[in-house]
Image: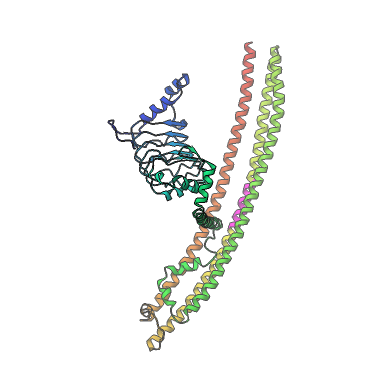
Amino acid sequence: MNRLYNSLEPRVMDDDMLKLAVGEQGPQEEAGLLARQEGILFKDVLSLQLDFQNILRIDNLWQFENLRKLQLDNNVIERIEGLDKLIHLVWLDLSFNNIEAIEGLDTLVNLEDLSLFNNRISKIDSLDALVKLQVLSLGNNHISNMMNIIYLRQFKDLRALSLAGNPVSESEDYSMFILAYLPDLVYLDSRRIDDHMKGLAELKHQFSIDELKHRESLIQARLEDEQAWREKLEEHKAAFVEHLNGPFLFDSMYAEDVEGNKLACLHGAGELLEAYKDKFVIICLNIFEYGLKQQEKRKVELDTFNECVQEAIQENQEQGKRRIAEFEEKHLLSLSAIRDESELSNLETKIAECSKDISELFNTLMTLEMQLVEQLEETINMFERNIIDLVGLFIENVQSLMAQCRDLENHHHEKLLEIAISALEKTVKGELDEDLPDEVRALFVDKDTVVNAVGSSHDIHLLKIDNREDELVTRVNSWCTHLVDKIHKDEIMRNRRRVKEISQYIDHMQNELDNLECSDIID
């Protein structure tokens, strides 16, 4: 069933093998000879045939970055590997090898046709990335579990499937099961599926299919909820206020606060903690809502800026096009007149006038570009001031709200310390009748131990608040800096491209005139 190692030594893909294959499969006429002399760039190869090469291991294919079709059948390959750079691959043939598991295909998102016929595969899996898969050949393998076929329901474009020659194909219900669970298939084992048989299969497995569809709908709903949650989280991150729309920050303050959790057992501490949490969460929600509003203002400011820039560029380009159109209309007439002129003195005058027109066009286009540069510079500077002001205001108000969080923490610390000292005094007098865990009672040996425990809890809370504030301020400042830098760099690159375009156009016009002048002088 599988290819065995033959008398030849198993080979590894190396540059010599690849160059030979590319050369043999390239054009054979004069163009092919020229290509072989100058060398064929692997990145330009679209199709590669490496069958019957006794290849043991897939390697050195990273240079074939634009490959569309790869034929590796009839070798002795044991693992699917070395294909991660072939992201444009559409067709892959790995049939007649010694592959035991499907793997190494995660980057092949454009693959439509995959053949793994005649290998040693026992499980259908690890194909999730192949969202465009249309044809799958897995015949003559070791697949025995009928339920494994259900995995293929996720491939909505799958139209042709081959599983003949597997243990699973020997089941009496083989065809009916596949037709029922993969209703969009058109071909099974190289035969067109009969609509009547498909209908019978659906009726036979209707109950199981309905149950499966229900489970799939629940899974899909969960996935959609998770995706919506991730999208919301990204929105919150863009506003720099993620996890501030609830008790997340407060809970994180107590997650590592061993002493604080112990002290919460004291009489009156629980009520104090709940009141503290309620007020703290309200401030976090205020920061969150304010952050979203400020993010929207920054977005409006950026969108308005981009619109202004595009309008200015478009208007400038339209002026340039009109000037070029006027020039070309006159230039064509000038060139025609030069060709028709036989008098040398007149010819020189007309050529000089034409050259002057080209120079004037250059000056006009460069003047327009300089005007645009000045206009955009003013627009960019205004945007920079506005966005820095918005970010500055955002930081100022967030810091003010964070200060309120610290005030709450300080107040809570004072009240908790009072409760703890009171408990210590009662303990000394033997009046503490609360049923406290031993680890809590161990705190009340002396005043220093109590004060240190309350202070340790307080320090952890302040550190969490400070870190969240510092993180927010650092990230928003970094975002602002990178945004402004990118805008300035993009404008520099735009200007360079435009100047280059103008220069190339003018050079072309001047060369055309120079060539015409030379031909007229020769004549």
Locate the N terminus and report the quarter of the image it occupies. top left
Is residue 388 one of those drawn in magenta? yes
Which residue is depicted at the point 56% across and 61% down? Answer: 395
Q: Is residue 493 above or below residue 265?
A: above
Q: How many marks?
A: 0
Left or right of residue 289: residue 333? right
Residue 15 occupies quadrant: top left
Locate the C terminus and report the quarter of the image it occupies. top right
User: Where does the magenta region start and end?
Assistant: 378-391
Viewer-proximal residue, 358 or 226?
Answer: 226
Left or right of residue 140: residue 230? right
Left or right of residue 188: residue 142? left
Image location of residue 316, percent across then percent down: 68, 38
Which residue is depicted at the point 47% across and 44% down? Answer: 130
Q: Is residue 4 above or below residue 390?
A: above
Viewer-proximal residue, 226 or 471?
Answer: 226
Image location of residue 201, percent across then percent down: 50, 48
Which residue is depicted at the point 65% across and 30% down? Answer: 362
Image location of residue 414, percent across then percent down: 48, 77
Q: Is residue 484 above or below residue 273?
A: above
Report if residue 103 is visible in the image: no
Instruction: Give the color scheme: rainbow, by chain, secondary structure or one colour.
Output: rainbow
Viewer-proximal residue, 76 or 191?
Answer: 191
Q: Which SS does the magenta portion mostly show? A: helix
Report if residue 420 is visible in the image: yes
Image location of residue 469, percent across then percent down: 51, 63
Query: Most extreme residue toward the left, as rendered?
Result: 7
Is residue 225 one of those drawn in magenta? no
